[in-house]
Image (cartoon, grey):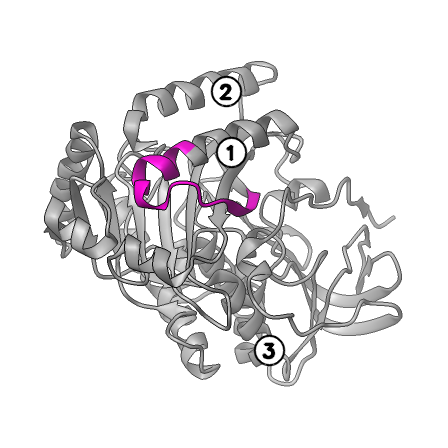
Amino acid sequence: MPKNIEVKRLPKDPGPAAWNSILPAAPEYPELTSDIDADWIVVGGGFTGLAAARRLSQLVGDESIVLLEANKLAEGPAGRNSGFMIDLPHDLNSETYAGAHEHDLQQIRLNRAAIRFAHDMAEEYEMDSKVFDPCGKVTGAGSAKGQAHIESYRHHLEALGEEYRLMSHGDMKDWTGLDFYRQGLYTPGAVMIQPAAFIRQAAQGLSGKVSFYENSPVIHIDLGNPHKLVTPKGTVKAKNIILAVNGHIQSFGFFPRQLLHVFTYASMTRALTDKEVTRLGGVNDWGILPADPMGTTVRRSSDFMGSGHRVVVRNHATLNQNMEVNSNNIRTAQKLQDKAFSNRFPMLNGIEMEHRWGGRLCLSWNSMPAFGEVETRIWSAACQNGLGTVKGTLSGMMAAEQAVLGKSDMLSEFLIHQAPAVLPPEPFLSLGAKVTMRWKEWQAGIEL
């Protein structure tokens, strides 16, 4: 008898997807309310799902492709991240973002391939520079400890043969308008995006080749030939499925006890007035990643499609293995973000936060993806280890290539990885993670 898959839970995202909320109303896609057939199904409409759908459209000719999104496009994690597409080593389980030399070189090659893929999408779909801006990234330090992290990272980049430029306190103040940062390190290969706008415009660009359905979560799969995916109001029969659902791959029964479900939190100001923009100074658009991985990410964005000039601060992380946050998580994050904002933007004292939210990450103990054919003609492209924009794009591309081609040069390099490691048992896992995260936040000091 064919095995059936009961989806145990559906995604729950705390607060609004702010990057989506500040844009004009989005184009709407229908809910699946009938029984249809397709050659290919992509489950999940984030960076991974859209990359998988686009790569499929390049590989399968006139075969039909359907994408099912549980919520609305850009309302999930894709509309909640900080909008950095990072090409260089950025291991969130590391003290300095760096890893082993050969592994880092491999990751750089793969990350840059994913960024080129996203760049081609931006070019083909005529995205504005504020949606996809290949401006590089800056790592910023506000303390001597942060500067020590930058020095360590600088040595690592030199060993990798990577280009960089150090920025002085004066450089950082001229650029940001802030006195806070003692030093910065600029690298040219990263891209800054408006994540929700990127998702929306990529979907619009694909709509001639891909059929999109919103508010259509998969709640059950009958395995067979074809497979049958059941949503609350309709079904799809398809021979091939790509599950682009990141941590929710466990809700489908795959990778048990192998994935860490982490939430990060952010706050966005209301639109700044012209006087406040003048008082802040600096350039209109910038973003800073913290030298300490547990520090605060800050981004300033200028007006785009009526969104206004705004500041975003992101910090705090919690492990929530049930994939839901609690009110204490939210309260703690808000206090930390208000403090981080006050420390960095004294000239904007009293400006209220208009949007506060949490975003889901999926990590593995050994920073490996949850990837591959998990059932006959069902592929997982999950566990992006905190880099959903780049790793998600890469994973979606590779799932499509494995499903259609079986092999390719890039896929062969991508597949040089281990399976996600088995996690310690509960309650030791969650207790240990909580203590470790809070200890590292305390150690981050003013960088938080």
Q: How many neighbours does mark 1 have within 10 angstroms: few (below 14), some (14-19), or many (20 or more)? A: many
Which residues lie in the magenta part?
339-359
Image check: 352 left or right of 246? left
Where residue 367 appears, x then y in whole percent? Answer: 42, 38
Question: At x 14% / y 43%, what residue is drawn?
Answer: 154
- Residue shown at 60% from the left, 43% from the top: 247
Magenta includes 342?
yes
Q: Which residue lies under the disc numbered 3?
A: 204
Q: Position of residue 283 (x, y in %)?
A: 26, 62
Rendering coords of residue 421 (x, y %): 49, 31
The CA distance from mark 1 to mark 3 is 35 Å
- Of the pair 32 and 111, the residue shown nearer to us: 32
Dot 3 surroundings within 10 Å: few (below 14), some, or many (20 or more)?
Answer: some
Q: Name which residue type carries label 3.
A: Gln
What's the residue type where badge 2 is placed?
Lys
Q: Which mark is residue 334?
A: 1
Left or right: residue 279 compared with residue 212: left
| Residue assigned mark 2 | 434
Q: Is residue 343 above or below residue 242?
A: above
Q: Nearer the viewer, residue 123 or 312?
A: 312
Look at the numbered disc 1 and give the secondary structure of its residue.
Answer: helix
| Gap between marks 2 and 3 measured at Cα | 41 Å
In the rendered image, residue 48 lying in the magenta stretch gets the answer no
The tag earlier along the polypeptide, 1 or 3, is 3
Tell me the crowding category of disc 2: few under 14, some 14 to 19, or many 20 or more residues within 10 angstroms, Cα based: some
Question: Can see residue 21?
Answer: yes
> Which of the two discs, 2 and 3, labels the residue nearer the N terminus?
3
Nearest the viewer among 135 and 304 is 304
Give the percent coordinates (x, y) of residue 296: 36, 38
Element carrying mark 2: helix
91 relative position to 4: left or right = left
